[in-house]
Amino acid sequence: MPARGCETTEPGNRRDLTCHDIEAPPGLAAGPILYARGADALEARLGVVAVTRNGAAAPVLHADGSDPVALRLRARLFGHCVWGADFALPAGPDAGYAIDGVRYLVRTDLTGDLAIGFVSCNGQENGDEERSHEDRDVMWRRLAADHRREPLALLLHGGDQLYADEAANAHPETRRWAALPLAEKPGVAWTPDMAEAVRGYFFRRYLALMRQPATAELCARTPSMMIWDDHDIFDGWGSHPPDLQESPVALGLFEAAREMFLLFQLGADPADLPATCRDRSGGNFSQDAAFPGFAVLLPDLRSERRPDRVMGEAGWQAFEAGLAAAPDGDRRIVVSSVPALGPRLSLVEALLDFYPGQQQYEDDLRDQWQSRGHRAEWKRFLSAMEGEMLRHGGPVTVVSGEIHLATRGEMRLPNGSRLHQLVASGITHPKPPAAMAIGLGLLSRLGHSPLKGRPIRLKRLPGQAMIYTADRNYLVLRRRAGEWSGAWELEESGRTPELGI
Ligand SMILES: [Fe+2]
């Protein structure tokens, strides 16, 4: 039922909820959450997920142009049922769907001018649950207000959709594992008890994040695409030494994170991945989807990550096939959880060789495309995107999070065009100390060219004095009359001027 103060319209016997201050349909514990699966001039393909308490009836989906259907049960978890369906809405004005009679309007005609939101880093490593939502969710509320003024066509989530690091506190044995020296970590067994405690932690966190009012408002109305980063599992996942990474407890934590990622970030039926996932085995969750005039690609940089590898062949094939699949000339928006263009961090890695015992920093640096251990793959990533731009004339824009700062970069191509990298982070993660922004800014002045003759330069956001802006933020991409731009919403200084991309 709508809460007091909502504007409600009633076309026919349906209720259109046009304000943010609403509750979910009465039978739901969380959701609905909407997922984008692609669109063309005729229809938008979508997925939806809703959670009820055990014993509640299956929620009923009534999509425009279709008969009502009951959502299908996907999982029973901790006294709850997770339900979902994939469906389509006709492209056109006032399109929408209803869950149990509560109707949501969705922007489905993506052929003309549009806006796309990008968010990342939705939490903090410790004590995220203890923060007051009043402060924590300032930027979510601002984004929801944007959506009320002009509905977003898509919402892209670029990693760290939750900070699950405290999953290791869920059971005494996982807590003991976390505190052990590296060499002793492989000796701790993973038990059904531990799995249950950790799965319960993940489920509770996802449920709480889905219920946060501004997120709930947006995610019911704006189709999302999400790709995970390390904190959706735990800090530095994939970049740790084998004694940690391959220990039974680490693998157990990954399995729990993966199960919940699939249900709540992909919005997937675990037995039948959405068509946006090219690797049907689920070994890598790289996704891509086509929309009128543009495509969105979300390479999965975590599932197959090791200290000497960013993606395995499954991930690379999915990413490269996705890039090639979009029609020539269409824009490719690539969501790379860690920035593809950044400062010369390999120099910092080399410096750390002189200061042994800095394992924590080495893991952080190993997470980056610029790490010495990933140089060949980094070049493969940049070459693939450059190839699309040079051979098929489709501009590529990379959007990333991860660093808890806002910045941008450009790689200049031989034909004079530019590969743009826009970094927006984080939506709720607190800003780091100013010294971090200054230090990275100094480092970025060195410049580098991982691909010969294609220099990378980091640049200030429009209207900002420094290369890195330390301020919570999100990004809005726009297409107007076929021209694309990006603008950052900064917590303290507001909206930047638009940057043509
Ligand atoms: Fe983050």
Image (tube, rainbow, N blue to C red):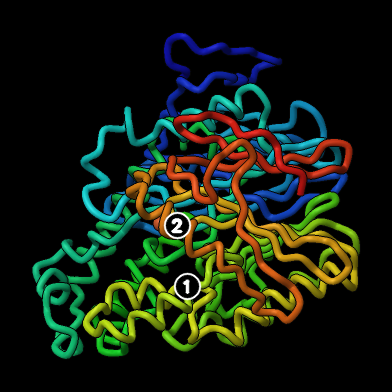
Asked if the beta carbon under badge 2 is closer than 8 A to the nearest atom of ligand 1, the reply is yes
User: Going 58% across and 13% down the picture, which residue do you hit?
Assistant: 8
In the displayed structure, 289 sits above or below 84; it is: below
Estimate the x, y position of residue 200 in percent, counting from the top left: 25, 58
In the displayed structure, 287 sits above or below 357; it is: above
Estimate the x, y position of residue 16 in percent, counting from the top left: 62, 20
Estimate the x, y position of residue 39 in percent, counting from the top left: 78, 50
Q: Tell me the distance, in whole angstroms, between the alpha carbons under discs 1 and 2.
A: 13 Å
Does residue 69 show up? no
> Is the residue marked by circle 1 packed among few (<14), some (14-19), or many (20+) residues within 10 Å?
some
The label nearer to you, 1 versus 2, is: 1
Q: Nearer the viewer, residue 341 or 367?
A: 341
**Left or right of 370, for residue 455:** right
User: Going 50% across and 31% down the picture, which residue do you hit?
Assistant: 217
Asked if the beta carbon under badge 1 is closer than 8 A to the nearest atom of ligand 1, the reply is no
Estimate the x, y position of residue 65 in percent, counting from the top left: 77, 37
**Left or right of 81, for residue 127:** left
> Is the residue marked by circle 2 packed among few (<14), some (14-19), or many (20+) residues within 10 Å?
many
Mark 1 or mark 2, earlier in chain: 1
Q: How many marks?
A: 2
Q: In the rendered image, which residue does mark 1 sit on?
A: 345
Give the image quadrant in which the ligand numbered 1 is located: bottom left
Q: Nearer the viewer, residue 495 or 309?
A: 495
Secondary structure beneath dot 2 equals loop
Q: Tell me, for residue 403, which label it has, or none.
A: 2
User: Going 25% across and 44% down the picture, which residue do you hit?
Assistant: 129
**Is there CB contact under 8 Å for labels 1 and 2?**
no
In the displayed structure, 198 sits above or below 310; it is: above
Q: Tell me, for residue 99, which label it has, or none.
A: none
Secondary structure beneath dot 1 equals helix
Q: Amino acid at mark 1?
A: Leu
